[in-house]
C-alpha cells in the first residue's frame, strides 16, 4: 500500500494512529497547530518552573512494538486484538488464532498477537485500550552490563533493563507478556470511537501472566524544575517563536495544512536530514535544497511515465507544486525558523525531564556493547483539549530508530 493510500484508508477521526512531533504541528494544522504547539511549550515551561496548575500532563514514550489494540468490539460484544488496522475501512479485528493467521501472516507479529489474544482477556478490559507491547516470555533475557545483572528486553530500538534482584524484575519474569497502555477508546460502535490519552487502568484485573502499566510520567528520584535562568531562556525562545509566527503568512501555513501532498513532501525531505544526523541550521539553504529535491523527484516521475497522458498529468502536477514552493520560498524559510525555535524549546524541556530516573534503565545495543541512552521521549497531553504531541530528540532517538534492526515485522 502506498503511503498516501494508507493515510486515506487509516484516517479516522478519534483514532490515535500516529502521534506527531510537536514541531510538525506547524505543518499539520497550520495556524491552529502552531498556536497549540506554542501553548503546549508554555504550559510545559510553567510546569517545570514549579506552577502546579499546568494544563499539560506528561507521559513517558515507551519504545514498544507492535502497537496493540485490544478490548470488546461494541458491535458484537466479542474480545479482539489487532494493530492499527482495526480502524481501517476493512477492519482487521482478530477474535481467534485463525483470524491472526489470515490477517497477519508475518512470523514475528503473528506470534506476538497470538500471545496478546491468549492473555489480555484476563485483564477484564471493558472498552478498548491501545498500548505498546514490550515483551513476550521468550523475549526476556538476563544480561550483565557494567558488572550488574539485569533482566532485559528489546521490543524495538531501545533495550530496557531492570536489576535482576528487584521486585519489578520478578514480576516481569513471571509474566507471559508485558504491555504499556497509553490510550483508551469509547463509543457505541467501532465507527464512532474517540480516543482519550487520560487513561485509567486501575479497574483492570491483576494477573501474573501480564505485566502492564500506564505511560504516565514516573519520577522515582525527585522533582525536576527549571532554574530562574532556564525559565528566562525558554521564555525568550518562546517569545521569538511568537514574533516569527505573527509575521508568517497564515495563507501559506494553512495551505500546507490543507494539502497532504505538500505535508508529505516537506516531512519526507526533513527526515532525510534526521537520517543523516543533520540539524537544520541554515533555513534559507534548507529551503533551496527542498525545492531542488522536490523538482528532481517530480522529474524522475515524469521520465518514468509510460503513457503520454500520464506524462502530461505529471507535468501539470509538477508545475502546480513548483509554483507554490517557488512563490512562497520566503514564507517557507520563516516556517522552518519557527520549527527550529520550537525544537530548541522542546529540547530544553526534554533535557530537564531526562534528568529524572525512570522505571527501567535504557540502553542501545551497539557493536561495542551496551551504550546508555535516554528514554525514547515523552508525550504532552492537553488536559482541556485532549490532544497530544511527541517530545522526542529526533537527532538522538529518531536517527537510531531509522537505522535500527527491528525485532519484529509488520
Image: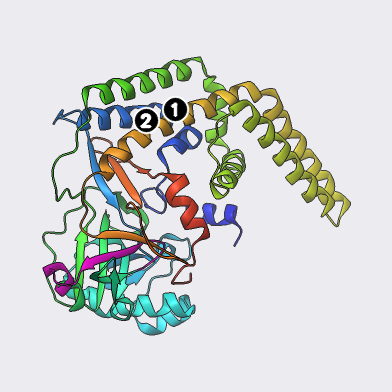
State how many labels appear. 2
Q: Residue 347's x, y, as percent?
A: 37, 36
Picture quadrant of residue 113: bottom left
Residue at figure coordinates x 86%, y 55% from the top left: 307
Residue at figure coordinates x 54%, y 46% from the top left: 277
For the residues labelled 1 and 2, the Cα–Cα distance comes to: 6 Å
How dense is the environment of label 2, judged by Cα within 10 Å: few (below 14), some, or many (20 and up)? many
Can residue 211 be seen in the rendering of this structure?
Answer: yes
The answer to whether mark 1 and mark 2 are in CB contact below 8 A is yes
| Residue indicated by mark 2 | 345
Q: Is residue 250 left or right of residue 44?
A: right
In the image, which disc is placed on residue 197?
A: none
Q: In what element is the residue under mark 2?
A: helix
Residue 44, compared with residue 113, is above or below; it is: above
Residue 50 belongs to magenta span: no
Residue 229, compared with residue 23, is above or below; it is: above
Residue 338, compared with residue 384, is above or below; it is: above
Name the quadrant of the N terminus. bottom right
| Residue indicated by mark 1 | 341
Q: In what element is the residue under mark 1?
A: helix
Q: Residue 378's x, y, as percent?
A: 31, 46
How dense is the environment of label 1, judged by Cα within 10 Å: few (below 14), some, or many (20 and up)? many
Residue farthest bottom in this picture: 98
Q: Which of the two residues, 164 or 99, is positioned nearer the viewer here? A: 164
Q: Residue 71's x, y, as percent?
A: 26, 67
Q: Which residues are magenta?
A: 154-170
Can residue 77 be seen in the rendering of this structure?
Answer: no
What colour scheme governs how the chains and residues are painted in the rendered image of this protein?
rainbow
Q: Residue 303's x, y, as percent?
A: 84, 51
Q: Is residue 275 left or right of residue 134?
A: right
Residue 159 belongs to magenta span: yes
Residue at figure coordinates x 59%, y 22% from the top left: 331
Amino acid at each position: 500500500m502506498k503511503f498516501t493510500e494508507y493515510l486515506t484508508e487509516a484516517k479516522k477521526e478519534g483514532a490515535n494512529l500516529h502521534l506527531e512531533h510537536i514541531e510538525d504541528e506547524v505543518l499539520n494544522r497550520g495556524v491552529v497547530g502552531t498556536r497549540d504547539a506554542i501553548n503546549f511549550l508554555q504550559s510545559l515551561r510553567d510546569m517545570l518552573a514549579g506552577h502546579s496548575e499546568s494544563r499539560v500532563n506528561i507521559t513517558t514514550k515507551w519504545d514498544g512494538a507492535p502497537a496493540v489494540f485490544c478490548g470488546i468490539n461494541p458491535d458484537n460484544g466479542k474480545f479482539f486484538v489487532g494493530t492499527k488496522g482495526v480502524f481501517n475501512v476493512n477492519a482487521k479485528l482478530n477474535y481467534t488464532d485463525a483470524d491472526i493467521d489470515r490477517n497477519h501472516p508475518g512470523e514475528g507479529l503473528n506470534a506476538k498477537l497470538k500471545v496478546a489474544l491468549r492473555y489480555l482477556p484476563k485483564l477484564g478490559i471493558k472498552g478498548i485500550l491501545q498500548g505498546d507491547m514490550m515483551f513476550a516470555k521468550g523475549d526476556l533475557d538476563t544480561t550483565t552490563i557494567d558488572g550488574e545483572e539485569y533482566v532485559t528486553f528489546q521490543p524495538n530500538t531501545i533495550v530496557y533493563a531492570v536489576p535482576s534482584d528487584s521486585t519489578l524484575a520478578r514480576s516481569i519474569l513471571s509474566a507471559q507478556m508485558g504491555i504499556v497502555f497509553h490510550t483508551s477508546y469509547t463509543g457505541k460502535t467501532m465507527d464512532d470511537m474517540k480516543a482519550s490519552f487520560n487513561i485509567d487502568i486501575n479497574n483492570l484485573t491483576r494477573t501474573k501472566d501480564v505485566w502492564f502499566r500506564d505511560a504516565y510520567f514516573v519520577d522515582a528520584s525527585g522533582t525536576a524544575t527549571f532554574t530562574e535562568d532556564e525559565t528566562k531562556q525558554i521564555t525568550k525562545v518562546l517569545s521569538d517563536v511568537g514574533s516569527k509566527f505573527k509575521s508568517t503568512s497564515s495563507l501559506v501555513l494553512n495551505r500546507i495544512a490543507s494539502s497532504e501532498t505538500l505535508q508529505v513532501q516537506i516531512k519526507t525531505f526533513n527526515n532525510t536530514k534526521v537520517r543523516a544526523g543533520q540539524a537544520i541550521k541554515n533555513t534559507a539553504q534548507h529551503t533551496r535544497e527542498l525545492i531542488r529535491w522536490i523538482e528532481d523527484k517530480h522529474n524522475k516521475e515524469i521520465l518514468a511515465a509510460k503513457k503520454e497522458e500520464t506524462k502530461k498529468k505529471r507535468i501539470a502536477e509538477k508545475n502546480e507544486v513548483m509554483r507554490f514552493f517557488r512563490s512562497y520560498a520566503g514564507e517557507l524559510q520563516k516556517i522552518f525558523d519557527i520549527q527550529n525555535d520550537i525544537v530548541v524549546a522542546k529540547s530544553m524541556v526534554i533535557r530537564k525531564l531526562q534528568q529524572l530516573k525512570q522505571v527501567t534503565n535504557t540502553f542501545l545495543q551497539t557493536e561495542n556493547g551496551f551504550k546508555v541512552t535516554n528514554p525514547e521521549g515523552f508525550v504532552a497531553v492537553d488536559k482541556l483539549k485532549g490532544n497530544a504531541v511527541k517530545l522526542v530528540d529526533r537527532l538522538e532517538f529518531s536517527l537510531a530508530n531509522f537505522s535500527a534492526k527491528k525485532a519484529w515485522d509488520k
